[in-house]
Amino acid sequence: MIIIVLGIAVLGGTIVIFMGGYNVAATSPHSGLMKWILHTTMQHSVSAQASSVHAPAQFTEEQVREGSLEFGEMCAACHGAPGKERGEIGKGLNPSPPNLAEVGSSWSSAELFWILKNGIKMTGMPAFGPTHSDARLWSIVAFVMQLPKLTPDDYKKMGHSVSEHEHQHEDGHDHQHQ
């Protein structure tokens, strides 16, 4: 009986796949069940994969400073930052990239490093391991670990723009909302 039910489920799933029955558009949100399955799978996978990563006992101010610059260049457009909304790319991703100032502390530094190095499939989170040294990745982790404590003013003092409207092109016009 179980084999028959399993066979019907596989056949039904195959039909849905080959007929294009599942809408993969980023503008179409996942169902609650699919969100739970994907998120739970990701959390447990990252935890398991990162278990062999040996994180530094503590980070230096220099690492936090360097990580701040890397974060501003590579991460803020999708994840936002204190006082800074996600950019256009980040607003169009599904699932929506998490606000790391809010959820960054829910991950260990080893887990954050693993995510940065390997990326997360089907989320838009790229793997930076092929393009960045481990030292650069640890500096980003050092900064992300500080994010929950930063105010928009703190972030701005680190040399970052905090307003989306401050972004102007060479001709002096704000083209963001056109």
Image: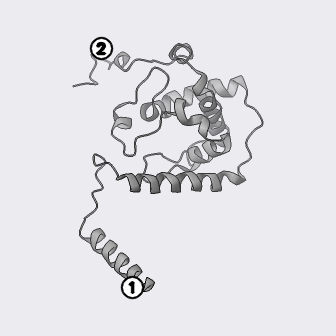
Q: Against 56, is 34 above or below?
A: below
Determine which residue is flagged by label 1. Answer: 4
- What is the C-alpha distance between the residues marked 1 and 2? 66 Å
Name the residue located 46 percent from the left edge and 20 percent from the top edge. 83
Residue at 35% across / 52% down in the picture?
A: 30
Circle number at residue 172:
2
* Quarter where residue 63 is shown: top right
Q: Residue at x 33, y 33 (%)?
A: 88
- The amino acid type, in three-letter code, at marker 2 is Gly
Q: Position of residue 102 (x, y in %)?
A: 53, 31
Can residue 132 be seen in the rendering of this structure? yes
Cβ–Cβ below 8 Å for labels 1 and 2?
A: no
Where residue 7 sits, quadrant-wise, is: bottom left
Left or right: residue 59 versus residue 38 is right
In the image, is residue 27 above or below residue 23? above
**Which part of the image, by quadrant, shows the N terminus?**
bottom left
Label 1's element? helix
Q: In front of the other: label 1 or label 2?
A: 1
Within 10 angstroms of label 1, few (less than 14), some, or many (20 or more) residues?
few
